[in-house]
Image: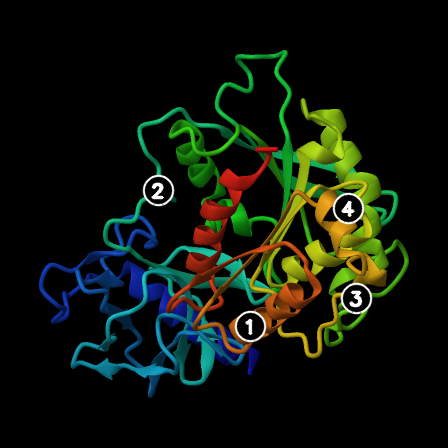
Amino acid sequence: MQRSVFRVAFLAFLASAAPKIWAQAPGGSKPASSNVRNAEYPLVSPDGRVTFRVRAPTAQKVEILPLIGLRANGLGKGAYEMTRDSEGFWSVTTPPAVPGLHYYSLVIDGVSVADPSSETFYGANHEMSAIEIPEPGVDFYLPKDVPHGQLRIFWYLSKVTGEWRRVFVYTPPGYDIHPRQRYPVLYLQHGGGENETGWPKQGHVNFILDNLIAAGKASPMIVAMGSGYAVRAGEAPSPVVPASPGRPSQEVSEAVEEVTVKELIPAVDAGFRTIADRSHRAMAGLSMGSVQTLSIGLHHLDTFSALGVLSRPPVEDFNPGTAYGGVMADAASFNKRLHLFWWSAGTAEEGIDTSVKATTAAFDKAGIHYTFVEYPGLSHEWQTWRKSLYDFAPRLFQW
């Protein structure tokens, strides 16, 4: 079985080295920006259709699978079966895809492999292919001719986990030119199955902030992006259990909370020119990261003054009066303590949009101040979260 898996993967690799024969793709199609260098396929048409092509001459069945687990994405809701030509090339053209970055797998005779023509991204707990579908007229997450900040890799030794931990840190334009200036900090969490590379690589956080700051729409800020996983030294990882409003799941283990509050924040404050007080410190996260943001942030309002909740997984029977240790029971007091309580969801996120709306309805009834932004037609993936950050960041540190 292992030899068969390697053979299939090797056949897929040969496809990238073999001479390319252009398939019948829609007119005006161009190689995707997410392709590896000089790869002609996948091709993206002006209306968002994608033509995939791979050479696997001995394969019996080849598919493109645009799924993560059981959740569909904007590339499609099921597998696309490819057609073989006389030279062993397999191809398929999809219907128009939703703009954004979509994960997918190449499935050759039942074995899922990465497309050798595509860049890989860490998602679903492994490196996998993804394709970027441009959105006409939308460029807020693309590089522009403006002053650019820097993405830095910062390491610190955790006493909680007994391991070195990696943090990606965005510093705004001019950080090194103005050595006396200090900055507020946004702690930005990734989602489940992804890691600290998500926001820098898939999310384009640096370009989003560069463009907002250059346009005068956002305050210059530092953004720290660490790992959302932590296990105490000597302990085995705990299985993730379903979320509940009080202390939502082991996605927010005590180790994650302790690492964030007692190690990550002090390490960033020591290593960068931060304004180290709660008024200049915010936390936000997507999916699993939103659960972590809520639990850690609401239990530590002495540490954070703003929270961003992106695509929170469904929660039933949410009660603001009792959730998170009753921190929202006194709405007037809570509203004074938290400067910004920001939520978002895409309308195509399975169950999430409905659940978030039920939560905000409970907020309305309880008198809790919040902001909710909805993104029509977007799924549980990066275009939703890029647009969320683009709306959330300008609201920060304006108090």
What residue is pinned by disc 3? 321
**Mark 4 or 1, closer to the camera:** 1
Considering only order in the chain, which callout, 3 or 2, is on the residue closer to the N terminus?
2
Residue 165 drawn above or below residue 185? below
Residue 277 drawn above or below residue 101? above
Q: Nearer the viewer, residue 113 or 207?
A: 207
Residue 17 visible to an observer of this rendering: yes
Tag 3 secondary structure: loop
Residue 311 drawn above or below residue 168? below
Tag 4 secondary structure: helix
Which three-letter amino acid code belongs to the residue tagged 2?
Leu
Which three-letter amino acid code belongs to the residue tagged 1?
Ile
At x 18% / y 76%, what residue is drawn?
87
The x and y percentages for residue 329 are: 81, 61
Q: Nearer the viewer, residue 325 or 184?
A: 325
The x and y percentages for residue 50 are: 25, 68
Inter-mark Cα distance, 1 to 3: 21 Å
